[in-house]
Amino acid sequence: MSGRVADGGTPLMTQYREIKARHPNAILFFRMGDFYEMFFDDAELGAKTLGITLTSRGDGVPLAGVPVKAAADYLRQLLAAGLRVAICEQVEDPKAAKGIVRREVVETITPGAVLDETFLAGTKNNFLVAAWADEAHGRMGGLAAVDLSTGEFLLETMPGERLAESVSRLGPAEVVQPAESALPLDDGVMRTAREAWEFDPALAQDDLARRFQLASLDGLGLGAEDAPAVGAAGALLRYLAELQPGGLPHLMRPVARRGEGHLWLDEMTRRNLELVEPLRAGTKGATLFEVIDATVTPMGGRLLRQWVLSPLADAAAIDRRLDAVTVFFADPRGRARLREALEGVRDLERLAGRAAAGRATPRELGALRDSLLRLPDVLGAFTGLKDRESSALLAAIARDFDLLADLAARLSAGLSDRPPAVLADGDAIRTGFDAELDELRGLRDGGKQYIASLQERERGRTGIPSLKVGYNKVFGYYLEVTHAHAGRVPPDYERRQTLAGAERYVTPELKEYEAKVLGAEERIGQREGALFALLRDEAGRAAPRLQQTARALAQLDVWAGLADLAERNQYVRPAVDQGFELELVGSRHPVLERRMAREAFIPNDVRFEPSARVLLVTGPNMAGKSTILRQIGLCVLLAQMGSYVPARSARIGVVDRLFTRVGASDNLARGQSTFMVEMSETSAILHSATARSLVLLDEIGRGTSTYDGVAIAWAVSEHLHDRTGCKTMFATHYHELMQLPETLAHARNYNVAVRESGGTVVFLHRLEPGGTDQSYGVHVAELAGLPAPVVARAREVLATLEGEHRVAPGEPTPPADPGQLALFAGEPDPVLRELGALDVDSLTPLEALNRLAELKKRASRPK
Ligand code: ADP
Ligand code: MG
């Protein structure tokens, strides 16, 4: 008997089990009074994740709980651990309940579905993305993304092979996909599997149209070609309906982004270039985003981040953004005025989202009002900008700028100057806004005044000078008389409470006024609640307009910030076109230069053109090879997001895809890395790079033996040179690769200069044409503090090795380390090697003839 109870057979546990059965994949926060309780497995997992105590109920059921007041903090931790949490509330007043209180799950919070901005970083969108590849539409990929904290809703359709990259570019917190999909996701992204039919575009079409009250999706500017994205949106909305049974009134209408217009950036490239995350977690000031972010509003910060992760790939579109930055750049005073005006604007996007979701507090609505009141200043500063008309984007913003003056006026009239954080604290609504409320407040205040005046009168009547009127929650208003004067208490005083030194009394008159005051208080609360809800709904209905204005402000903020950055750090406007050439003169690394003393960073020139498109950079360790490589990638990325670049001049032929790879032993991004991973990443480049791509390879092939490494690096460079034809920079300390330009017509050698003077090495950090002939490895070892005798011995060994193994005298062959010595000396001629590797069966007759001609040409070249 008791065994069944111990099994949780009470009505409460029955209710719990019923609810839990419907939320098997989430931790259930089961509201009991002032606590959210977790039971069974949830309790064990929750306690472990949160580091709280695991106890058990009297009947042996494991139990752990968190106070409702501190729930936000615990929720944040559970989300960060990649868990979902279903919030189950008591949905009726416990006092009114017959039997056990009714409970319901009111929302499920997942890493991607977070409404409450207190869980979120201000300068980061929190995207929940649905993605799939649609076989019925020629394997097109479709994605839909929402940020519940702002209400943003994006749709994108792209060729299937771009799907993974498009998803990862959004930096989602969670990705919803068909159960059988194997879409690769970035580390730490939650994967949510749904059934394949949920992605059906035809189903979704109806759902979307209904949701946004449209006859057809044409109204959203969506056509048949958007079917894959629409399908994704359908699955997303279905999932959200489960997470938020109360609905999501603040979701914006979806905006379709049409693929291809963006620069392809894969995860490895984003990480290696440290765009938004540092390679070493926790390092401050290491990312491009941190260094270029001069925005003053949260929505500006979020937009800039989106732009960093999603630069453009169309010269005309880039130029339009650059035109806007130029206007701000050319008018420093106008820019300063605008930035100052913007500074008072709070997170309009999220405030609008909160209002529309019915969650805004009085204080938040106040912040919304205060922000709106700043808008005339913002618009004034904006329209006052010199030469504003020269930018088409700025002209468009000026034309459509919505000050929301109507809403600002309503909120100003309705809300008090400093609305409270919680409605129950009162005084959210301004005096003069509502006659009924004013009257109730008059009653209350009159009653309070009367009660206050009572003190004087009763002192006079009783002759007790220390008589006091007071109030407490349990007894209400009372008259307090110290024991010393107990004898003078009149007969109409009724005793209520005895304290150590005094007695508390009430009188019929006091009770009468107390009823008036308390009655008025209660009605004030109700009236304020109703009025506040009215104002919040009005703001909620204006959410689409607020979002549009927020979007405009975000852009102004970003452009003004980029102009500010450009002026402070001497950036230059890049000339951007659809051609091939890429030329940077006096370019710097935007992040490294900021970490050095002014002017300490050595600028470098670099130029890619069709006839010199594969650049091999050699140089000893610490020379600056990796720096120049990344600096090129960052400059291109900055230019393509519409920013000025750290250089004296820059001409940038727009790149369609940017790849950055770092060889295994150099690669911090990957932690536990294997040569296999390095090679599969390199392989991905060879498959997806086009002639318009930029490929930056840093010590690729390093994760294996020297022979293998050089061979692979050689073959990869050849492929990129011959087949892909893209701009490539390859940094390597394998000096053997310096022979590549001898056989590859469009490859060039560069080195990062080092000078030796008086036995020490000076790093000049200057990129120069030609190869290097010294490795300086021993010098670097010396700099690193290797004991002097070891260094001296190393010099001796080096000299011997160099003496023994000079290969092909007259060639600029580097003195190599012992591991590299015999490589080209003992190897067969490259032409022979290639002949040996040729698979004759797989060649067409024409290919065979071409290869023969090519090999003949190479064989007859003087060696
Ligand atoms: P490598 O890849 O050739 O080993 P790095 O690019 O990692 O060398 O550069 C090593 C260090 O040299 C950097 O951390 C930086 O301090 C310095 N450095 C590199 N390039 C420059 C430069 N252009 N100007 C000033 N210092 C530089
Ligand atoms: Mg390096």
Image (cartoon, helix red, strand yellow):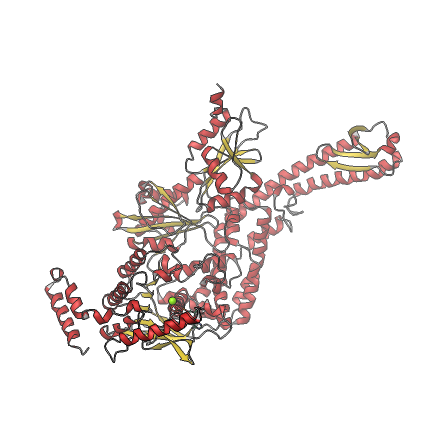
**In the rendering, at what x and y percent does residue 43 appear?**
48, 35
| 607 relative position to 323: left or right | left
Task: Report the label total.
Answer: 0
Q: Nearer the viewer, residue 704 or 746?
A: 704
Check the image and report above or below for 139 versus 529: below
- Residue sticking out furthest to the top: 1
**In the rendering, at what x and y percent does residue 712 appear?**
26, 63
Q: Residue at x 40, y 79 (%)?
A: 756
**In the rendering, at what x and y percent does residue 769 appear?**
33, 78
| 124 relative position to 610: left or right | right
Check the image and report above or below for 536 versus 29: below
Report whether residue 215 is seen.
Answer: no
Q: Locate ligand 2 by image quadrant.
A: bottom left
Q: Nearer the viewer, residue 818 or 436?
A: 818
Report whether residue 78 is seen.
Answer: yes
Q: Residue at x 46, y 32 (%)?
A: 40
**In the rendering, at what x and y percent does residue 624 appear?**
40, 71
Image-quadrant location for residue 467: top right
| 349 relative position to 128: left or right | right
Check the image and report above or below for 151 versus 262: above
- Residue sticking out furthest to the left: 845
| 568 relative position to 477: left or right | left
Check the image and report above or below for 673 versus 621: above
Q: Nearer the viewer, residue 619 or 683?
A: 619
Q: Nearer the viewer, residue 715 or 124?
A: 715
Quadrant (top left/top right/bottom left/bottom right) for the C terminus: bottom left
